[in-house]
Image: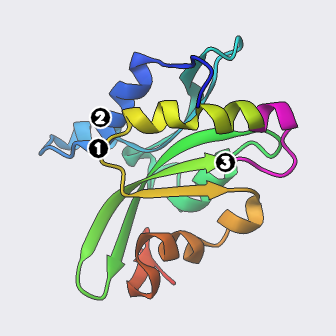
Amino acid sequence: MYWGVTVTDEVIRVFNDMKVRKSSTQDEVKKRKKAVMFCMSEDKKNIIVEDGKQILVGDIGETVDDPYLCFVKLLPPNDCRYALYDATYETKESKKEDLVFIFWAPESAPLKSKMIYASSKDAIKKKFTGIKHEWQVNGLDDIQDRATLAEKLGGNMVVTLEGKPL
């Protein structure tokens, strides 16, 4: 149940751009989002793309050494967010990429914020069709260790995440 919250067209466009991995030029690949945050608008009526809270594929190796740790640092310590993270990982059999929908609701967030984000989660999830992995995270202890995400992606079958061994 959500309180008439609207997911903006920009959020849907960002999701579709991340989901569809069509063959692209090198420049287009660099502009693709690796991770992006979504938040409530000031009036709490819309879910919007949060300005400046993203990592582009082209940033990796330039301004971003470890995309996973950089993503964790984007999370606000005292408020809720939704996020999409494009995880690159290897199992014993193959290399994979999967989008992960993350609902960030730290213990330190105000109760009202947690209630609004929790009750609006279905609105954004319905727009994100085909997401295989969903993860609710309630604090940095749950997300700082990349092995926790690896567990969500494929259990003990995952051997690397973002090129880093587990």
Q: Return the mark for residue 140.
A: none
Q: Secondary structure at mark 3?
A: strand
Q: Secondary structure at mark 1?
A: helix
Query: Looking at the image, which residue is at 60% across and 47% down?
Result: 103
Kindly tell me whether residue 65 is visible in this rendering.
Answer: no
Residue at the extreme front: 1
Q: Residues within 10 Å of mark 2 (few under 14, many from 20)?
A: some
Locate residue 16 relative to residue 126 in the image: left or right.
left
Q: Give how far across and how far down residue 150 sits, in percent.
A: 49, 74
Identify the residue under disc 1.
19
Is 82 covered by the magenta stretch? no
Cβ–Cβ below 8 Å for labels 1 and 2?
Answer: yes
Q: Give how far across and how far down residue 1 sits, in percent.
A: 58, 31
Kindly tell me whether residue 103 is visible in this rendering.
Answer: yes
So how many labels did they put on this image?
Answer: 3
Q: Residues within 10 Å of mark 1 (few under 14, many from 20)?
A: some
Residue at the extreme left: 23
**Could you give the CA–CA distance between mark 1 and mark 2, rounded to whole angstroms?**
5 Å
Write down the quadrant of residue 27 in the picture.
Answer: top left
What amino acid type should be assigned to the residue bearing mark 2? Asn
What amino acid type should be assigned to the residue bearing mark 1? Lys
Query: Looking at the image, which residue is at 39% across and 17% down?
Result: 9
Q: Quick one: 95 or 107, which is closer to the camera?
A: 107
Identify the residue under disc 3.
104
Q: Is residue 127 positioned above or below 9 on the image?
A: below
Locate residue 148 relative to residue 10 in the image: left or right.
right
Q: Secondary structure at mark 2?
A: helix
Identify the residue under disc 2.
16
**Could you give the CA–CA distance between mark 3 and mark 1, rounded to whole angstroms?**
20 Å
Q: Is residue 122 positioned above or below 49 on the image?
A: below
Magenta segment boundaries in residue numbering: 105-114
Q: Give how far across and how far down residue 108 sits, in percent.
A: 87, 47
